[in-house]
Image: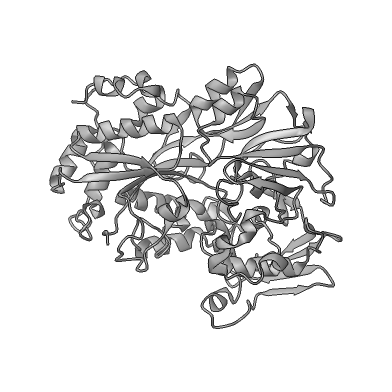
Amino acid sequence: MLASSVFYSIGGNMKKLYVVIVAVLAHLMFISSASAQPTNSNQLSDPRVRQALCMAIDMKTIGETLFEDQIIMADSLLPNGPYKSPNLPDYSYNPEKARQLLAEANWDSNRELDMVFYYGDQLTTDFMAAIQAYFADVGVKMTYRLLQGDVGAQLNSVPEDGVNGPAAVDYDLGYGARAAIAMQEYYNSFKTGLNPQTPGDPKMDALIEKINSSADPEVLKPYFFEIQEYQMEKANICPLYYQKLFIYESDKVSRNGEMYGNDQYNYDWKIENWKVDGGVLQTNTGPIEFFEQPWYNLGIWIHSKVVFDRLLVADGGLVPTGCSACESYDLAPDGMSLTFKLRDGLTWHDGDDFTVEDVAWSIRTAIKAPRIHSVVVNTVNSIKGAEAFKNGSTDDVAGIKYSIADRTITLEMATLDPNILTTFSQFAILPKHKLGDVDPNQLQQSDFWQMPVGSGPFKVTEVKMNDFAKLVPFDNYHGGKAGFDIIAYPSFDGDGNLIKNAAAGKMDYGFTKNVADVAALDAMANMSTKAVDIPYTRMMWIMQYPKP
């Protein structure tokens, strides 16, 4: 039995966590003799082990205590909504069943699993300690560590052989999240060759093709049911909880009537119209060692939101609503071509003209560049001729046609992409004149990312890496000139210095998914928070490839 004293010895938020051990009844899941076997030398490739790990964690108690009832327990990657299957296996807390499955799989009790995570807050550390204790209770050893540096490469590098491996990353388990702008995004990364932890599977590939086959939600609904049920039967991941996003603002900030929404992406928030007392907005998610190129994390970093412009805008729920850098757009009724006409007079921050050639170059580069957001990948790879361009068979993309004089660009699609408009509400256009000579595979390594040039409402004027970045209003922004500067302090998505900086008057705007931050911010006289419902799933990844 797991003694509550284990948790009270950990400290921090864990002191809140009481555990009442009860016998939990769970539905027994049928596993065929063919599927209940490891597929390689890694014991984590055995579905019984993965199911046991999922069942070993008491998310109900953790949610009520550590997370202060601010989360919803997850039973699949997809959040609750119209695509949620009613026929999912039950992996709720059941330590007895977990021990049974581990015994059946001949689990090596001397093996110590390595759990990695990338959130630097105390709550996450306490959560890792709780999982460690729950795993120990069923006979699984686990240590945990915070990733630093190039976190994306450490987490998401994929094997050269997407079926047999070996793994290209060095961990057994990972704690992280999927924040989706399209429901397909939850599953597209499981296609053969795209996932760092899960070997390719022809059936999963076929199911992924189905969920991308239509733009009609009713047509897609049974396909989403099917892929959820299949993934959870195999327990390729352990979905842990669905979380809200909390926007915080100081009393210096007024949005001036502009909307709130999912602030980890781009939407029509019109920051140039905000009012800021004192003329300086202090925020976080500034650069640490470099500005991250904006095609991977889309809107998490402040520069991704305000330094670069998009062709389209979306509302607060990320539904595309109209133009930003474009004057107009036309999507064919069958979804197989999309034409943009750019606004007249657009320029980059350095004064060069922003043209459709920049748009065409950005799309071509995204086809070849590594570490691109999965929704963007699906769009650019669906363009006619993208595959031939990517593999070097041609030196251009047949489906990209543009006229600089007319300011128009047309994309002809080889396959339907149900989320093409969503992509162009999030996809930043980059300057060809600054990056055109860079190898797409080395895009992030360019010196450009020490002081990037964009076309959005703010431009970068001063940077001291791992200290601050200063952004000032861009006079020629088509939406109008902002009336304040931005000082961005360095941090990842989870900012360990948020409360300290807010208490010192050095934080005016941002967002957090850490519920402990919310209580601390609301207790400050000058700060307030606003909860926003978002499609956001936190999960535990399980490495199934053999190690090198």
> Closest to the observer: 462 or 72?
462
Looking at the image, which residue is at 61% across and 26% down? 502
Name the side, left or right, on which 411 lies relative to 355. left
Location of residue 112 in the rendering, given as x and y in whole percent from the top left corner: 22, 44
Looking at the image, which residue is at 63% across and 54% down? 450
Location of residue 25 in the rendering, given as x and y in whole percent from the top left corner: 24, 30
Name the side, left or right, on which 108 lies relative to 510. left
317 shown above or below 333: above
Quarter of the image where one finds residue 470: top right
Which quadrant of the figure contains the C terminus?
bottom left
> Closest to the observer: 414 or 58?
58
206 shown above or below 139: below
Residue positioned most to the bottom: 393
Looking at the image, which residue is at 32% across and 66% down? 163
Visible residue check, residue 30: no
Quarter of the image where one finds residue 142: top left
Location of residue 53 in the rendering, given as x and y in whole percent from the top left corner: 27, 41
Name the side, left or right, on which 368 lies relative to 318. left
